Image (cartoon, rainbow, N blue to C red):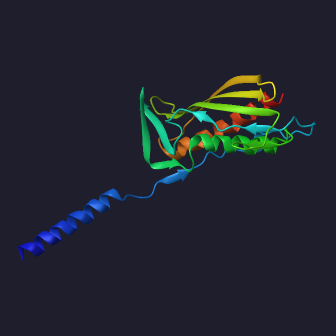
Amino acid sequence: MKTLYKLCLTAAASLLLIACQSGPAPQHYLITPDDQAITISHAKPKPALRVEPVKSSAILNTTQMEYKRHDNQVEFYTQSQWSVPVPRMIQDLMVESLVKSGRFSDVISAPSDLSTPLRLDLHLYTLEQDFTKSPYKAIARMHVRLVDTHSQRIIRSKMFFDEETILDYNAKAGVDAYNRLFSRMIPKVIDEIAR
């Protein structure tokens, strides 16, 4: 009888432990800016462009979604994450937006064996949800460099910074703020490199 009691107690403890570990599945998000702000060009397009993989710190090169409640302390949402690593998501957004703009004769996403006359290097320095003070902010900082691949000459180089108010204290509100932020930033990047 004692053995049966111990076996039942062990089984109940195991089930309780499993139930505590298996919470709801995390929500997956993508940044999906409104592309209505992208001006479609009818002028003769510039030469073909290859968009290189976005460089970023290790903390951004993941699907974890970060936020800050205290200065100098980064935390990660446990029930919310990106659908793809942030650098890949930003690269895909840039390629899609550049294609839509019609400003370049072709836009290729690296890695690719195809050579193009122009290359776009992107370095994402900051993508964070800052809850340290009100109003809460979504912040992005990205360096953009357009390079002539034949001469290896830098044609354009600029740092872009933007922030957008987060309307609620949660991951979805942060993603909504990123959507508004990148709806402004991406057209500015395109205008800068296509001028």
In the picture, measured across the screen, residue 178 lies left or right of residue 40, that is left
Q: Residue 158: give x, y in percent of width and height.
A: 70, 23
Q: Residue 116: give x, y in percent of width and height.
A: 81, 37
In the image, what residue occupies the spot 71% across and 44% down? 34
**The C terminus lies in quadrant:** top right
Choose top left, top right, bottom left or bottom right for residue 174.
top right
Q: Total number of numbered labels?
A: 0
Q: Residue 150: give x, y in percent of width and height.
A: 81, 28
Q: Nearer the viewer, residue 113 or 139?
A: 113
Q: Residue 163: give x, y in percent of width and height.
A: 60, 30
Choose top left, top right, bottom left or bottom right for residue 173.
top right
In the image, what residue occupies the spot 51% across and 31% down? 135
Q: Is residue 78 above or below residue 178?
A: below
Which residue is situated farthest in the left direction here?
2
**The N terminus lies in quadrant:** bottom left
Q: Nearer the viewer, residue 51 or 8?
A: 51
Q: Nearer the viewer, residue 143 or 23?
A: 143
Choose top left, top right, bottom left or bottom right for residue 177.
top right
Q: Is residue 152 above or below residue 46?
A: above
In the image, what residue occupies the spot 43% across and 41% down? 76
In the picture, measured across the screen, residue 108 lies left or right of residue 10, that is right
